[in-house]
Amino acid sequence: MGILEDHINNYTSSEHPTVQITEPEQTPKKTGNSLSHYLCDLSESVSDQLNRDMLVELKNNLSNVLFQKEYTYTHVTKFLAYMYESIEGNPIILTALDRIKRMDEYTFAHSVNTAFYAMFIAMWMELEEQEIINATQAGFLHDIGKIYIPDTILNKRGPLTKEEYEIIQIHPLYGYSLLDELSEFNLEVKRAVLFHHERIDASGYPLSATDDYVGLLPKIIAVADVYDAMTTNRVYKKGKTPLEAIEFLSNQGRQELDNQVLGYFLNNIPVYDFKAS
């Protein structure tokens, strides 16, 4: 039985899955079973630097998006400011992002970008304000489980082995387990972390969950996650242009990603290269 199957067998179908974590080699040591016990406290200087880094990422995203409707900029700026204020007052998100940043700069930038796109999608869908905040928080935290994945796997230049890919597939379970005991985040945010790699054809991971079980928020994070991952350069692969990514999502993407969420994204995202070069 493979690594992934071992973890899936520990999953229950209730609203509060229990994940038994076995730590792979070269992963950080932790005490206790919660994120608040596991993540180190941020010093004031580290927190200030992290805030600056986050602002740079958010500013770059905002300044590089060319909207089709003039009022959108003002609309988004209001929510972006509110989002940042709520994050700044949440030490759990800050400590999580700090650990991600120290682990891997790409994952940190990707987490900020995913939160940014998820916020836009939720706004384009005209969801309630709390749902927009949920989408943003889930975007920031969707890859928090990767702090358990060895750097040799995360940044491997060549193809992953079957065993390495199975380890990567466990990160949503790790992330859910870390957030499960924390009252700072509601169940929807936690489920989005767990299900963001699930697909509507049940081909995703870690649970091959069916479309009707996953829920809306994980589907929003999935679209945001896939688009940013596709359009970002990595050390081992050049990213697609936004046009190439949009074309891919318009065709093959409809087979795996929720078509309603994808429709809102494709109808609103600019059809020209707006990401930083």
Image: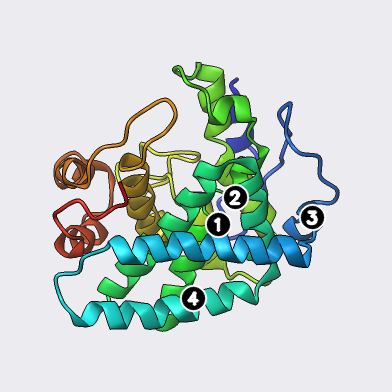
Residue 41 horizontal side relative to residue 101, left or right: right
Q: CA distance from mark 1 to mark 2?
A: 5 Å
| Sequence-wise first label, 4 or 1 | 4
| Sequence-wise first label, 4 or 2 | 4
Q: CA distance from mark 4 to mark 3?
A: 23 Å
Q: Is residue 36 visible?
A: yes
The image's mark for residue 273 is none
| Sequence-wise first label, 3 or 2 | 3
Residue at the outermost right position: 31
Residue 210 horizontal side relative to residue 188, left or right: left
* Residue 15 in the image: above or below residue 76: above
Q: CA distance from mark 3 to mark 2?
A: 14 Å
Disc 3 secondary structure class? loop
Q: Residue at x 22, y 47 (%)?
A: 242
Q: Residue at x 36, y 61 (%)?
A: 61
Check disc 4 and give the amino acid type: Met
Check disc 1 and give the amino acid type: Leu
Q: CA distance from mark 3 to mark 1?
A: 16 Å
| Sequence-wise first label, 3 or 1 | 3
The image's mark for residue 144 is 2
* Residue 19 in the image: above or below residue 212: above
Check disc 3 and give the amino acid type: Cys
**Answer yes or no: do the residues labelled 4 and 2 have beta carbons within 8 Å?**
no
**Answer yes or no: do the residues labelled 1 and 2 have beta carbons within 8 Å?**
yes
The image's mark for residue 83 is 4
* Residue 268 in the image: above or below residue 254: below
Residue denoted by label 3: 40
Residue denoted by label 1: 141
Q: In front: 244, or 222?
A: 244
Residue 274 locus on image (x, y percent): 24, 55
* Residue 27 in the image: above or below residue 101: above
Disc 1 secondary structure class? helix
